[in-house]
Amino acid sequence: MSTLLSIENLEVHFPIRRGATFGRTTGYVRAVDGASLEIRRGETLGLVGESGSGKTTLGRAMLRVVEPTGGRITLHLEGGSNVDLRTVDRVELRRLWRHMQLIFQDPYASLNPRMTVRDIIGESLLVHGIAKGAELEERVVEVIRRCGLDAEHLGRYPHAFSGGQRQRISIARALILQPEFIVCDEPISALDVSIQAQILNLLKSLQQELGLTYLFIAHDLAAVAYACDRVAVMYLGQIVEMAETQKLYYTPKHPYTEALMSAIPVPDPDARLKPVLLPGERPDPANPPPGCRFHTRCRYADAKCRTEMPALAPIDDGHLVACHHAGSLTLQGAREQADALATA
Amino acid sequence: MTATTPTQSRSSGAYFRPDVATQWQLMWRRFRRHHMAMAGLAILGLLILIALFAEIIAPYQASQRNTRYLASGPMAIHVVDDQGNFHRPFVYAQVNKRDPVTLRMTAVEDRTRIWPIAFFVRGTPYELWGLIPTDIHLFGVEGGFVHLFGTDTLGRDLFSRTMYATRISLSIGLVGVLVSFIVGTIVGGIAGYFGGTVDFVIMRIIEFKRSIPTLPLWLALSAALPRDWSSLQIYVAITLLLALIGWTHLARTVRSKLLALREEEFVIAARLAGCSDARLIWRHLLPSFMSFLIVDVTIAFPEVLLAETSLSFLGLGLREPVESWGVLLYAAQNIRSIAHLPWLLIPGAFVIFAALAFNFLGDGLRDAADPYTK
């Protein structure tokens, strides 16, 4: 599979200002701080991590909805030409957004309450001058049917729909320009569990029909396991581990991934979970610890971890991890956890 | 139009809308329940009608003098005469008599004769809106005169003058608010949408302007207007003056709303859809806070109105022969007027009613525009 989009050392630093008007910049929140990953054509790459780890910011910076402050984003277009996404101007960026779209977490905030579904979905066709009038109507109807809604819904306003239906509208809007790449920013977090499965399946079938590539941001590890081919784990603005879903879940190589996996809930009220509890709090991203970002909460940390930042490096085929001790640690994966529960 | 069943219009793909109330319909429903606001709306409607048709409603021209009824009070309308006979509405005839004590000529009711009030009578010729020559007035008396609000020392009909003044005062408010609305929206829009240095500079300018107390600024600026300007020039200048000072508040509202909305997800989605800045602002951002702006404008209206009135009252705003409520009140400034001609204060009631009506209207609109009220 060829690479569709790659990012190298991407940084998004938000300045912290003290004082209302003549404020000095006293520091930066390092929301994304040197993240690197590659997204392959046609795959679903999961991006997991706890709240505040920078998942959403990374997803948006990739599309330059949020301006990155450092690093490179390269878009590999069909036909072999590469575009340095960080240097394109606004006009070009607007054109490139036809290839890349975003689905939002909150289906209540992401649809303009003062526009009908027809106008919401058809807008990009109109502004790009692709279609209008009857042709626009036709294409909107086609895409909305694909997403499981009906032509009669087009004249209504978003408030007339349930959360799941709104998310379908949101997906239809992202699809109308026939993009190749879609960043799904926690598309199911705001939905009922029963609706979550519907939306996941919709995304899956759309991917098969249209050959889409997803970046699937979520913190529901079960949903990620179901939806994704590969998964990247994010901690404090950095990618700490990336591998195929099975490998990452069953043979994690980073202590943080181990802790995450042990926290997957089990649908059994009697099950006694024994999660790997991380001591302390997530450090402030404005003031990250030196060395390995995770050493303050890692039970395997030693002197090297406290001073030297580990690079994201391959440990075996397609399994990348940023840990000094990745080779020597034996860590529990999701299966060991499940087995331990079964025997207990 | 042929009646189509819902199924037909559905299959034809025509713009089919089931029972979905738009934002404005919902607002109107909530607004109708606000009785004071509805009253305000009614009063405003009446005032606007007066402003539009001042020439017809006024029985006389604003500058027309009646030397037989100088500085005399409002004439009462009766339907029953001294003999107890019913008539159509009438006023008693007036005759001039010399006061035995002050030796001044005063108008006295002659209760033996009546002047019946007629509707759509022919009176002083005029041109409606400066275009249509006619001499029809809404009401009047034949063979006599009628002064519902009395007259001033020159014998000019106060009722007619108030009608004409309503036109000027309301139009100043309207134009003033419109200009400040446009300037405020554009400047605030630029500041809020682009942010950064542009925002910083604009906000500092606005703060500087707001730090100057308004009344002295108005006084200074209007005193600086050349004395030899025609009353029309003064009128335009005063309107612009009031507008150019009033826009700052609106600009700040627009800016803060834009700053908040800029980060909304549906705005980001619209950007990703490829919307240009202009389309983003007009199609997505402005409609989202238009309701707040309308409320702001209804509240800004009485401010401009009162500013004009107070300027004219102080003699620095409009001047005769232009009539405005402030100009009319200017005549009622001294103790002699209040003691002898208290009816000269009647235009003040119009100012109060208009300001209250706008405030109630703004109140009702604010409640109606707030999606969280039940």
Image: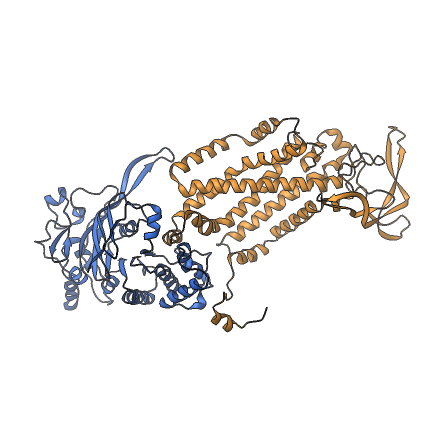
Chain colours: A blue, B orange
Percent across and percent down for residue B120 are: 79, 50
Percent across and percent down for residue A7 are: 23, 50
Q: A222 or B231: which is nearer to us?
A: B231
Q: Residue furthest left?
A: A328
Q: Is residue A203 toward the left or the right of residue B3 in the image? A: left
Q: Is residue B199 toward the left or the right of residue A9 in the image? A: right
Q: Quadrant of the C terminus of chain A?
A: bottom left
The answer to whether residue B141 is visible is: yes
> Could you say which quadrant of the image residue A160 lies in?
bottom left
The answer to whether residue A33 is visible is: no
Percent across and percent down for residue B350 are: 68, 42
Above or below residue A277? Residue B237 is above
Q: B108 or A239: which is nearer to us?
A: A239
The residue that appears at 68% across and 42% down in the rendered structure is B167
> Could you say which quadrant of the image residue B102 lies in?
top right
Percent across and percent down for residue B286 are: 47, 49
Above or below residue A5? Residue B204 is above
Q: Is residue A290 toward the left or the right of residue B285 in the image? A: left
Above or below residue B94? Residue B373 is below
**Across the whole image, how many numbered discs are drawn on residues?**
0
Q: Quadrant of the N terminus of chain A?
A: bottom left
Q: B256 or B138: which is nearer to us?
A: B138
